[in-house]
Amino acid sequence: MKRLQLPLPFLPLIYLTRLMPFADSWHIKARAHHCSVTNKPFSEGQPFLTALFTDPGSDGYLRLDFSEDGWGTRNEKEPQPFSFWRSVYRPPEAETRIEIVEKDDPEALLARLVEEDEAHTENARYILAVMLERRKLLIETDSQKTRSGLLRIYQHRHSGEIFIVKDPQIPLSEVAPLQAEVQQLLAPGETEAEPANGDSEGESSSGPESN
């Protein structure tokens, strides 16, 4: 995806969508339904731009959605965004229809883990994001290097929700165990039953010693 290199206009804070601050991961709610500059509603299929700004007051991010006309009124003296990209607008009714069909457990789990932001789930969050990207539910729109590491920015293909997930640079040798950990989070009952089968095999193998 070709990144845009355009400065953004100054805008009053009333148009900014505030995100809850976390150390390395953020879950940003769905897109706005109107332009932050012109306040005109978006129409279905209309190209628009999303921009994320750092928020010094909360150590989090602020989101703005722009029509192309609104984006063109930018003031070059204003700060550049942390990340920005172009999308196509989908109305709320279409989002709802698609979500009913395609809502998946990995998606809900990723949202929960990102909002909880527990240090021990950092690797699992990244594995889930990659899983959803492969299922074409998330699109990686950008990546940014920060003091805490590499942050990957994903947008939900249908709802426009944004997930910012730290890339923990997982060694290849650790990928399989982490995938097993994620499967346990998704279906704990199934993974808990596996050790029981292994124990029963161990007991049967000790049988010949009684001869």
Image (cartoon, rainbow, N blue to C red):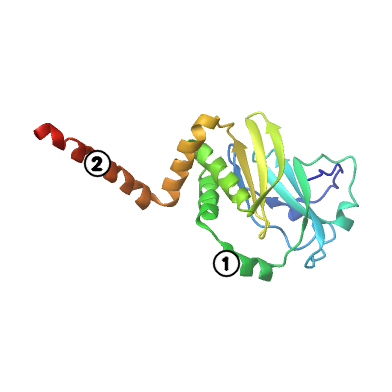
- Nearest to N terminus: mark 1 or mark 2: 1
Asked whether 9 or 93 is in front, the reply is 93
**Residue 154 point in image, percent of width and height:** 66, 47
Secondary-structure class at tag 2: helix
Residue for badge 1: 101
Relative to residue 172, is residue 90 drawn left or right? right
Q: Quadrant of residue 15?
A: bottom right
Residue at 44% of width from left, 42% of height from top?
180
Give the residue type at disc 1. Answer: Val
Give the residue type at disc 2. Answer: Glu
Asked whether 114 or 123 is in front, the reply is 123
Q: Quadrant of residue 167?
A: top right
Secondary-structure class at tag 1: helix
**Is 170 rendered above or below residue 11?**
above
**Is 97 rendered above or below residue 180?**
below
Please, which residue is most extreme toward the left here?
211
Position of the N terminus by quadrant: top right
**Is 169 rendered above or below residue 80?**
above
**Is 104 rendered above or below residue 113?**
below
Q: Quadrant of residue 102?
A: bottom right
**Residue 66 point in image, percent of width and height:** 81, 55
**Residue 121 point in image, percent of width and height:** 49, 39
How far apart marks 1 and 2 lie (CA) works out to 41 Å
Position of the C terminus by quadrant: top left
Residue at 45% of width from left, 51% of height from top?
186
Please tell me how crowded label 2 is: few (under 14), some (14-19), or many (20+) other residues with Cα within 10 Å: few
Residue for badge 2: 201
